């Protein structure tokens, strides 16, 4: 598969972050393998031990998935994007680059609203945004998303609807996030949710919501590694 190349400044940051992501894989595999062997791991409800372990880990969306999100945002001419689960900001860079490129092509303004619970990760993400030269296109909201996403308006334009959502979060938080965002999604808006084959059981509440015809969505699972749910607002 040919790889999409962004600006050299952004690619330099991505190369460093993906190297860091790859470097921790062995540690992640060892931890979760040990917990499964113990019989103490619940994929639907991480305990304090797991939260503590993950608190400093760079959880990054795979490059092919991130490139797919960039392409979707360009195709949608997305101006207002929401990311559920920013971590160190790898996927945010792809989303912000797409919004920036849409603004350059069409004029006007655009914004990615990111969410991150861990203060240390939010601080690291902001530094990465600055290094990549994309800070002006990102508003990172720190804290519990059930509070930070109550209003997805922002300093750009309170009237703009949401064009695109990336959902890459602990599974029990997916439905609460979707319920908050659904009223703000324009018809034709797309929502991408990661790992919906690998963690399907954990997404049961999310699937119940997007499969309910009354909520106005159509959805399908794309065959990326772990599964990638592609949901479109149709009504």
Image (tube, grey):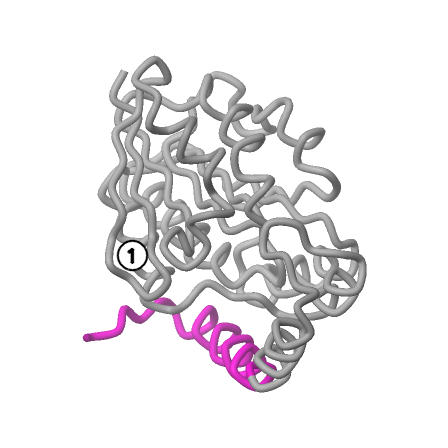
Q: Is residue 66 above or below residue 213?
A: below
Q: Quadrant of the C terminus?
A: top left
Left or right? Give the position of 47 relative to 162: right
**Rendered residue at 40%/48% (across/down):** 100
Region in magenta: 1-25
**Rendered residue at 61%/72% (across/down):** 36
Packing grade of label 1 (10 A; few <14, some 14-19, many >=20) is some
In reply to whether residue 11 is colored magenta, the answer given is yes
Q: Is residue 137 above or below residue 106?
A: below
**Rendered residue at 48%/73% (across/down):** 14
Residue 141, percent from left and from top: 68, 41
Residue 150, percent from left and from top: 64, 23
Residue lying farthest left?
1
Q: Of residues 232 and 127, which is closer to you in this image? A: 232
Q: Quadrant of the N terminus?
A: bottom left
Residue 6, percent from left and from top: 35, 67
Q: Main secondary structure of the magenta part?
A: helix
In reply to whether residue 6 is colored magenta, the answer given is yes
Left or right? Give the position of 12 relative to 33: left
Q: Of residues 39 and 57, which is closer to you in this image? A: 39
Q: Which residue is mark 1?
A: 68
- The image quadrant that residue 227 belongs to is bottom left
Q: Of residues 70 and 63, which is closer to you in this image? A: 63
Query: How many numbered dots are placed on residues in this image?
Result: 1
Residue 119, percent from left and from top: 78, 54
Q: Is residue 26 above or below residue 57?
A: below
- Give SS at disc 1: helix
């Amino acid at each position: 598969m040919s790889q999409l190349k962004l600006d050299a400044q952004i690619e330099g940051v991505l190369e460093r972050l993906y190297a860091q992501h790859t470097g921790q894989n062995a540690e992640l595999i060892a931890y979760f393998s040990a917990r499964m062997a113990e019989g103490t791991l619940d994929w639907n409800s991480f305990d304090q031990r797991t939260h503590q372990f993950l608190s400093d880990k760079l959880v990054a969306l795979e490059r092919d998935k991130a490139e797919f999100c960039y392409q979707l945002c360009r195709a949608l001419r997305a101006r207002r994007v929401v990311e559920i689960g920013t971590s160190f900001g790898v996927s945010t860079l792809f989303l912000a680059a797409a919004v920036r490129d849409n603004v350059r092509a069409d004029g006007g303004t655009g914004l990615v609203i990111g969410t991150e619970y861990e203060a240390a990760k939010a601080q690291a993400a902001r530094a990465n945004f600055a290094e990549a030269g994309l800070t002006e296109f990102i508003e990172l909201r720190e804290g519990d998303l059930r509070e930070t996403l109550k209003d997805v308006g922002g300093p750009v334009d309170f009237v703009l609807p949401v064009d695109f959502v990336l959902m890459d979060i602990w599974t029990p938080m997916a439905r609460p996030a979707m319920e908050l965002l659904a009223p703000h999604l324009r018809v034709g808006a797309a929502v991408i949710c990661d790992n919906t084959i690998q963690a399907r059981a954990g997404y049961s509440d999310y699937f119940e919501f997007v499969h309910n015809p009354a909520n106005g969505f159509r959805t399908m699972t794309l065959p990326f590694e772990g599964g990638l749910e592609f949901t479109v607002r149709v009504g």
